[in-house]
Image (cartoon, rainbow, N blue to C red):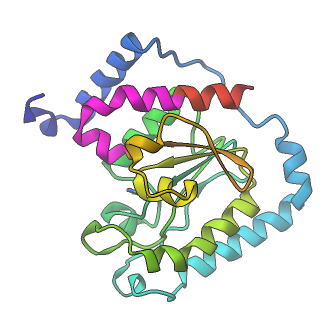
Amino acid sequence: MNNNHTDYPGFIDFLHLIEDYLTSGFKTEPVVLQAEEAGERLQEGKPEQTSTQLESLHNEICACTKCDLHFNRLHAVPGEGVGNPLLLVIGEAPGGQEDKKGLPFVGRAGQYLDKWLQAIQIDRTTNCFITNVVKCRPPENRDPHPEEIRMCLPYLEQQIKLLKPAFLLSVGRISSQLLVESTKGIGALRGGTYFYRNLPLVPTFHPSAVLRDQSLRAKVWEDLKLLRTLMRR
Ligand code: URA
C-alpha cells in the first residue's frame, strides 16, 4: 500500500468497498432490517415517556461536569440515531470533528463506519443508534482514563435501558474490553458473540484502526457478517 491513499480517501475507500464486495462474497440488499419485536419493546417503556427520558438524559450529558474532560470540550456528544434501534454501536470517545459538531462518528472514521453499516442494511437514520463509552473528547484524542470511563459509564447504561436495542456492536479496544469485561486485545476479542446486559454483543476493530491498517478489513467483514446473521435470526 503506498501513501497516496491519503490524497483520495473517499475514492480509495470506495475501491476497497468494491474489493470487499468481490472478495468476501459480500452483498448489500435493498432491505432495511428492523427489530421484529420493536413494537413490543417500545410498548414496554411507553414511547413518548421513553423519548422524554432520553431527551433529559442527553441534556444531562451535555451539561455534565463530573470529570475534567468537560473543561476542554466544545460539545458533549450523547449520540445519534433512532429509539428502539436494531443495533446500538458503541465507540470509544468523540474526536475533533465530533467535539465540534456534537455528533458521534462524523469524521473520516465515522464516514467509513457508515459504509460498514450500510453494507449490512444498518443506518443511523432508520434502525441504529451510535454512541461512545465516553461522551466528551479526551485531549489530543488520547485514550480515555479508567476514571473517566467509570464516571461516564452510567450514561451508557441508561441509554441502553431507554433505547432498548436488540444488538450491540462495539468498535475498538476500549469499548470492547469494557463490555466484554476483559483485558484481552481487540484482535483476540473479536470473532465471536458475547452478551452485555443480556444483549448479544459483537466486538470488532475501530474504523480508524482499519483506515490505518487495511489488512484488518477482511476480519471486520467477518464480524459484520456474523452480526448480520444474528440480526436475521
Ligand atoms: N472515534 C470514536 O470512537 N468515536 C467517535 O465518535 C469518533 C471517533
Given residues 162 and 59, the one toward you in this image is 162
Give the left or right position of residue 165, taking residue 168 as reference. right
Figure disc tally = 0
Figure quadrant of residue 70: bottom left
**Where the N terminus falls, by quadrant?**
top left
Residue 50 falls inside the magenta stretch: no
Give the left or right position of residue 13, taking residue 117 as reference. left
**Residue plotted at (53% across, 19% down):** 28
**Residue plotted at (45% across, 86% down):** 67
User: Residue 165 appears at what percent x and percent y?
Assistant: 71, 49
**Where the C terminus falls, by quadrant?**
top right
Given residues 99 and 37, the one toward you in this image is 37
User: Residue 43 appears at what percent x and percent y?
Assistant: 91, 53
User: Residue 194 appears at what percent x and percent y?
Assistant: 62, 44
Given residues 191 and 232, the one toward you in this image is 191
Magenta stretch in the rendered image? 207-224
User: Residue 98 appears at what percent x and percent y?
Assistant: 39, 62
Image height of 92 relative to 221, above or below: below
